[in-house]
Amino acid sequence: MQSVLITGANRGLGLGMVKYLLKQNKAEKIFATCRSPSEELQKLLQDNKNLHVIQLDVKNTDKFEEVALQISRVVGDNGLNLLINNAGVTTKYTKINLVKPEQLLENLAVNTIAPIILTKTLLPLLKKASEANSDKPVGIERAAVINMSSVLGSIAQNDQGGFYPYRCSKAALNAATKSMSIDLKKDQILVASMHPGWVKTDMGGNKAPLDVATSINGIFDTIYKLREEDSGKFLQYDGTELPW
């Protein structure tokens, strides 16, 4: 894989993805976006010439074109092979009598609107990668979009209620993933939703059963195996298909 862009890369899963790709030497060019680089990400930047950190608040969609230009200057006609829409926010468990409009709006802006508009903005670069790698099967070695979702976005598996802002935003992201997979099929661009598991991060909390490394290893083991018939699926980090 020549190039990958990961949003929300300053901590948690996003940072774990960057570290995995660098350690495994899995990508020639890694673009990592974040609102403010953490010390760990800055250290990685200093030690790795193939890592490019781009400051971005994904709620600021007006900056997406500028991001696309920065990436284009580096990748040229090779385009962008893989977009991982990872940046996300969540609220605490929210019952119907406590949910607030601002919580719903923030979750929707970061978890749903940003991935859709960023994918739209980077589509010309994804198409370039697909065309440049037309000798390869559909997948991340050619061109792909992975939307980091959550099992809490599954309507079929919702048996606890609550979590209105997060559940609704991730269910909407899953709907967008399905539409993207249909719209981008003609361009041979794979699109899938990925549930990373319940992971020990700032978002997941200390009670989560999975550590970051286990989740990341599973995610990349799974997405490297994805082929054309997997486009439009909702998958767990270990490859298990989840119900919408």
Image: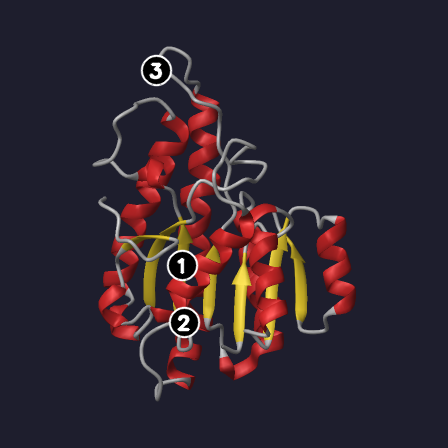
Is label 2 in a helix, a strand or a loop? loop
Task: Find out whether the residues at labels 1 and 2 contact each other: C-beta distance under 8 Å.
Answer: yes
Viewer-nearest residue: 112 or 30: 30
What's the residue type where badge 1 is placed? Ile
Viewer-nearest residue: 30 or 57: 30
What's the residue type where badge 3 is placed? Ile
Task: Point out the tag, 2 or 3, that comes first from the N-terminus.
Answer: 3
Task: Point out the tag, 3 or 1, that comes first from the N-terminus.
Answer: 3
Quarter assignment of residue 224: bottom left
Residue 106 located left or right of residue 188: right
Residue position marked by numbered label 1 in the rendering: 146
Pinpoint residue 35: horizontal percent, then vertical percent.
65, 46
Residue at x 49% of width, y 36% of height? 208
Dot 1: within a 10 Å radius of its alpha carbon, few (fewer than 14), some, or many (20 or more) residues? Answer: many
Residue at x 37% of width, y 55% of height? 238
Residue at x 57% of width, y 73% of height? 72
Residue position marked by numbered label 3 in the rendering: 96
Is label 3 in a helix, a strand or a loop? loop
Residue position marked by numbered label 2 in the rendering: 140
What's the residue type where badge 2 is placed? Ile
**Distance from Cα at disc 3 to Cα at disc 1:** 31 Å
